[in-house]
Image (cartoon, grey):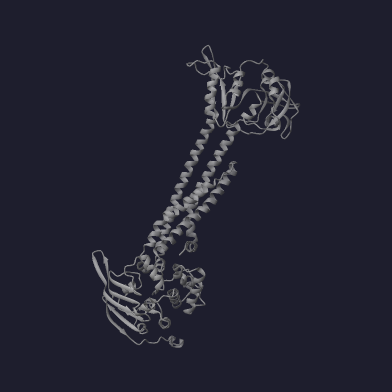
Amino acid sequence: MNGNRERMPLIALRGASKVYRTGDVEVAALKGVDFTVEAGEFVAIMGSSGSGKSTMMNILGCLDRPTTGRYLLEGQDVSRLDRTELAVVRNRTLGFVFQSFNLLARTSALENVELPLLYAGVSARERRRRAREALERVGLGERLEHHPRQLSGGQQQRVAIARALVNRPRLLLADEPTGNLDSRTSVEVMVLFQELRREGITLVLVTHEPDIAGYAGRVVVMKDGRILSDQRQQPVPAVVPPLEEAVS
Amino acid sequence: MNLLETLRLAVSSLLRSKMRSFLTSLGIIIGVGAVIAMVAIGDGARANVQKVFDSMGTDLLIILPGSSNSGGARGGFGSQPSITWDDLEAIRTQVPSVRAAAPELRTSTQVFSEDQNWRTSVIGTTPDFFAVRAWSLAEGERFSEADVEVGAKVVVLGQTVVEKLYGAGFNPVGQVVRINKMPFTVVGVTARKGQSPMGTDNDDTLFVPATTFQRQVQAQSLGKYIPGALFVQADPTAGTARAWEDLTVLLRERHRLSEDEANDFDIRDLSEMANSRQQSTETLSLLLASIAAVSLVVGGIGIMNIMLVSVTERTREIGVRAAVGARPRDILAQFLIEALVLALLGGLVGAALGLGVARLLAARFQWPLLVRPDVIFLALGFSALVGVGFGLYPARKASRLDPIDALRYE
């Protein structure tokens, strides 16, 4: 099983399409896309709004199902699972990072990070230990009891990343993770992502900023519900500029 | 996610907006409080009525002699003596559904101690009277059958009479009082009964043997007929209705009344009076409790309303929870338990409030405080039911949200 898993791609979309129906009008957001991501890749998906990249992201994240076609995640066809089964897949296999962080307000960083473990049925003590570990991993070991309001945008996004990582997923999905961050904190997040990639986590991120896409090893450009181009590249190593430089 | 985790989650989210949670449960608080207070008040009032009627004697029937008819002018019941002393003896010994019976001969007269006097009512009777009319003795003892036999000049005083003749707290047993200038030895004092249901003072009376009453107080010779009423206590297992029938049959037989002749006596069932009073208080408390129950339902609607607002407000939170792996049933449980906790907390606070009000009213009206645990559990159970019932719709709504829409919700 394990050897099998090594050989098959982590993500495989086979002729996936998505049709939204509003009244009598049918809008095809995704038109028969074939898309494969091997384990350990760092993929950036680019495209203008309406290109279908968000729809694809929702399907990859098991938040939505393709209208036709198949989605194999770790070799398992998840395109016909019901809502409860999809929730379990999201919980076990995936981690999400959103543009707007989506942390629970008036809830400490630690409790926010514990959330996926709560639904995985992990004991309270183990939850606490692993949440603390995850927060230390993203450099927030000193901010465990802080509420989102007491944290900067960059810190909030790192809490969100810790939350995405806490269940040790194989795949991290990030939807415009730097969209609400300044350039310096954006680079900090990218440093973290590149570290995660080196640790063997597969990353797929959606962005419209070319320099953010530059940190990935593969860039996919989408247009009108189809993949326009799919290129591998040498990723730019993310380095946080010294503080003086950022100020000037 | 297990139940305890969900419960913890619900409590912490309710604590985040304490004021709102409190106001939401207020409907339930008032509803449960009202139900418990109303039932306690109803029970208290009923017990109070019961107490008053018990002081008259339980399972009581009264037999009045027939009416006289002189020259076409018909007297009322009791105007024509028709019950004989032998009838009384027969009632006491031959009717199994009768536990005890005693005559009540009544008049009022002036009684004298050494330095005081007082006009009071005098009752001539037999020793059974004390049991039949639920009189207990505070001092001394009642007079005996032998005293009745020989017409002994002994007397049992009521508390009010003792107060007027000797002053409160005095033990007059062994003292001599004069009734119709005749000396009577005080052998006992009855315990205080207080006011009768008709508002008269039960304790303003004294008791002498029936024979003594006729000879000394009324200065008459003993006749065949009893010049007064009979009080009969039915056997509780047989009941007053059965005793009523048995007494009617017995007396008709003894008076040799033919089929078409009317009764020359009248038997009244006093327990019916108590029952009808009882029923009216019961109807009243049932009415009050059902009005209170309506406010429970209104409270439930309040919970549903706030839970719907809460689901809308927390759409994004629901989206986040769903994204990180909450199953629809986890979301359902979270909101359902929140509603349940709101309702149950409201129920508990309401129960405490209701008990407080009941206690206050009981103290104010000097009722016995009766709290029925079954009513409390029923009210709590009902409020839990209200919580689940009215929480279900909002919780289902939350659990059916599409995670993508929920995450995008602003």
Point out residue B328 in the picture as x, y percentages from the top left corner.
39, 63
Q: Quadrant of residue B152?
A: top right
Q: Nearer the viewer, residue B51 or B179?
A: B51
Horizontal and vertical percent for residue A53? Answer: 31, 75
From the top left corner, tell me how far across and down residue A210 is, in percent: 34, 83
Residue visible at 56% across and 17% down in the picture:
B254
Q: Is B24 situated left or right of B136 in this image?
A: left
User: Which residue, as the protein is rendered here, is positioned at the far top?
Assistant: B71
Residue B85's quadrant in the figure? top right
Residue A112 can be seen in this image: yes
- The quadrant of the picture occupied by the N terminus of chain B is bottom left
| Residue toward you, B107 or A90 | A90
Total numbered labels placed on residues in the image: 0
- Left or right relative to B196: residue A248: left
Identify whether B182 is placed above or below B236: above
Q: Quadrant of the C terminus of chain B?
A: bottom left
Measured along the vertical axis of the image, is residue B11 above or below residue B262?
Answer: below
**Any part of residue A184 in sight:** no
B73 or B63, which is in the foreground?
A: B63
Q: Residue at x 41, y 63 (%)?
A: B313
Q: Residue furthest left?
A: A24
Q: Position of residue A23 (x, y in %)?
A: 25, 63
Question: Relative to A41, does residue B392 appear above or below in the rendering?
Answer: above
